[in-house]
Image (cartoon, rainbow, N blue to C red):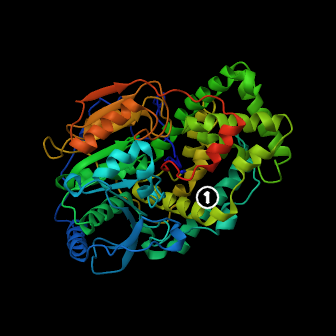
Amino acid sequence: MRAVALYGALGSLVLTALATAPAGSATPPRAPGDQPPAEAAWSVPDEDAPEARGTATAAARAAAAGITWGRCHKTENLPKPVQCGTVSVPMDYAQPDGRKISLTVSRVAATGPQKERQGALVFNPGGPGASGMEFPLYGELAEWRPLAKAYDFVGYAPRGVGRSAPLSCQNPAEFMKAPTNAPIHPDEAYKTVRKNRAKEYAQGCSLRGGAVLRHYTSLNNARDLDVVRAALGEKKINFVGASYGSYFGAVYATLFPGHVRRMVFDSAVNPDPRQIWYRNNLDQSAAFENRWADWRRWVAKHDDVYHLGRTQQEVLSSYEKARTKTERTPAGGKVGSAQLQSAFLKVGYYDAFWPRRAYALSEYLRGNDKPLVEQASPAAVGAEAEENGNAVYTAVECNDAAWPTEWRVWDEDNTRLARTAPFETWDNAWMNLPCAFWPEKQQKPLDVRTAAGALPPVLILAAERDAATPYTGALELQRRLSGASLVTERRSGTHGIGGGENACINRHWETYLLTGRTPGRHAACGPHAEPEPETQAERERRDRRAIPRPVI
């Protein structure tokens, strides 16, 4: 499931299910309300399994050790008052006395009086492969300040990410190589090149990851979260998981329902085991076509500013003109069609990108390539972090579940889908194709589900037109988590909506996190306002902002 920086950059899932099952699928798509087949019947996680016993052992040790807070390592680039520390977890929970790794953790203490403090609020921005180390800084944003008064804001880098036993599969410079081209309807020769590249990447993961590669999984991410909870001295966790963070948060709720105090699932992944992860990625590609159309509609609405076309089709023609141009002559010698597509994919995640990308495209077609080069060029300084995030993404998704191993299945599914959803389909396929050649034994996904009364009230936030985590996923997650409340942002597609621009959404999530009250089974909010074209002064002001939104 591909992700991009949310709140910074990796993902995707569908607003509408595919009309037919993917080639090689065992079961056809079903509506979110359908009951799972008998063979998928839920069973309680085995508390006597070696991994369960190992998690309990690791959590007890972490609770005794606590976290020694101090100055953050210079590579974290986190200013005061952020403090940092580490939490030791087993690489293999079946062997808690075996190899240990250290997860880096960050914190800013609650700003309100001690009597109002409600413990630690732990945040994960998604990925897999994104770091939450910057999360304590969010307390400086107006939308987050009421929560920052009540909670210690705690972020961490999951296993494999950043300085938490970092994983790599390829030389970062090679991974970020540019300019490159990526046709939306690839020919057989190009497909062969990408198959070979995917096979090499999977082999690189095996070579660099070694014997521990198989331990980068969503199950272990959930177990790590419980050890972090214990190290913080919290008997029960307060957790916000965005995008992929919602998935392993749901895995956590299934494994440790008695350890949950409050949980928010922002932009929820469809947790149906049959969706993890191959079918979720196909669904994601289909959904991005809808959000791509939303951006083109907006640009056409502002044709007096951008002059890219007065209809969606005319705007698409302008984009295709730019794609063809970058394929022939890379913009600034740095931006080929692959970099162009990667930059414009972000309009499907966050409409805050709409004015920036429209301006860059308009200027490029007028002969000024500087804005496009600034927005789409790979940053050499971030190559190591980008490759690290992709390595963790690949390892977790490939380890989590079985993937088709026959190229015929991938080719048929993506060729068919690209006929109606060409914008993201093949790029998404190439990102996930290493899983077809994965050298490790792949797991069976946990059947996310909680019994009635086992879990306290939890809150799900979802935008109706979210492409990265389509709305059907939120409905499915609510069905599986007994007593869950769903708050919907109507007619909107921003990915990650808590603490954002919609005051109605923020009232619901703030009320829940501060009081534990939910709005009932379902509540709805109108959409936040669409962006307006930016002036030059507004562009300069935005570029000077110091605190980023979170990242998915």
- Position of residue 543 relative to residue 133, above or below, is above
- Quarter holding residue 233: bottom left
> Residue at coordinates 67% horizontally, 54% vertically from top-left?
194
Place of residue 35 in the rendered image (x, y in percent of width and height, measured from the top left): 26, 33
Residue nearest the observer in this picture, 532 or 439: 532
Q: Which residue lies furthest to the front in this view?
A: 113
Give left or right: position of 136 versus 374.
left
Q: Position of residue 63 (x, y in %)?
A: 22, 71
- Name which quarter of the figure residue 136 lies in: bottom left
Q: Nearer the viewer, residue 155 or 41?
A: 155
Amino acid at pointer 1: Ala
Residue 179 to residue 243: above or below: below
Q: Residue pushed farthest bottom? A: 98
Q: Where is residue 74 in the image (x, y as percent from the top left)?
A: 53, 73
At 47% from the left and 53% from the top, the residue drawn is 127
Label 1: which residue? 198
Asked if 322 appears above or below 439 in the picture, the reply is above
